Image (cartoon, grey):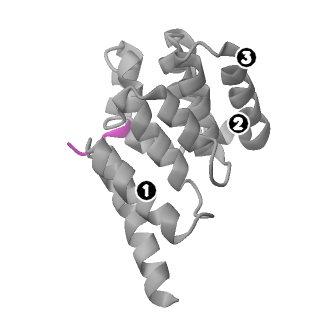
Amino acid sequence: MLLAEDARGKARGASRAYFFAGHYRESITEAERAFVLDPNLDSTRGVEGRAYLVLGDFPAAVRTCESGPMNWNNFTCLAVAQHKLGNERAAQEALDTLRQDSGDSAAYQYSLIYAQWGNLPLALDWLEKAHRLSDPGILWMRSDRLMDPIRNQPRFAAIEQALDLPN
């Protein structure tokens, strides 16, 4: 059992590392491996779904994020993917569920969602709130491709500078 837990943890960690390094296909492969080892593994499906989002495969993102245990990562993925597919009601429902479940602790995720929805002012408002609240997700803002719509905004640059993230 210990070996299975170790393999599961390695696959989960590798999936996240590949995602934030920009290796999305490898991230998906490792997430699938982790899910096979433990279908109840928290947030693995959400990371896999976010990789599909970056790759532009929105139907696959929806399928992936609707499976497995539902959590903040899955609802973030669903809000973006459903919006990209034109399913505004389903996108809003995912965002509403995320808000109900997470409150302001998902400030970074709200920023990401609004950035992907094209609401740049609201995305930046939430990013500033994530910074004020020390939301741990904000540490990924430099490498998270889903934040690209606001990346060139002065408010984004100001937050990035204030965080003094390593290069």
Amino acid, disc 2: Leu
Q: Which residue is the extreme one toward the left?
A: 167
Give x and y (percent) for residue 41: 58, 63
- In this rendering, is residue 9 above or below 82? below
Q: Nearer the viewer, mark 2 or mark 3?
A: 3
First-in-chain label (2 vs 1): 1
Residue placed under numbered mark 1 in the picture: 31
- Which sits in the foreground, 71 or 99? 71
Is residue 77 part of the magenta span, yes or no?
A: no
Q: How far apart, in angstroms, are the residues tagged by discs 2 and 1?
A: 22 Å
Residue placed under numbered mark 3 in the picture: 89
**The magenta segment:** 163-167
Amino acid, disc 1: Ala
Q: Judging from the image, what secondary structure is the residue with disc 3 in?
A: helix
Give x and y (percent) for residue 81: 54, 26
> For the point 51% across and 29% down, which residue is it?
59
Question: Of the numbered discs in the image, which one, if any, rests on residue 52?
Answer: none
Circle 3 residues within 10 Å: few <14, some 14–19, many ≥20: few
Residue placed under numbered mark 2 in the picture: 98
Q: How far apart, in angstroms, are the residues tagged by discs 2 and 3?
A: 14 Å
Q: Is residue 73 left or right of residue 98?
A: left
Q: Quadrant of residue 15?
A: bottom left
Q: Is residue 105 left or right of residue 4?
A: right
Q: Quadrant of residue 30?
A: bottom left
Q: Quadrant of residue 23?
A: top left
Q: Judging from the image, what secondary structure is the residue with disc 2 in?
A: helix
Q: Judging from the image, what secondary structure is the residue with disc 1 in?
A: helix
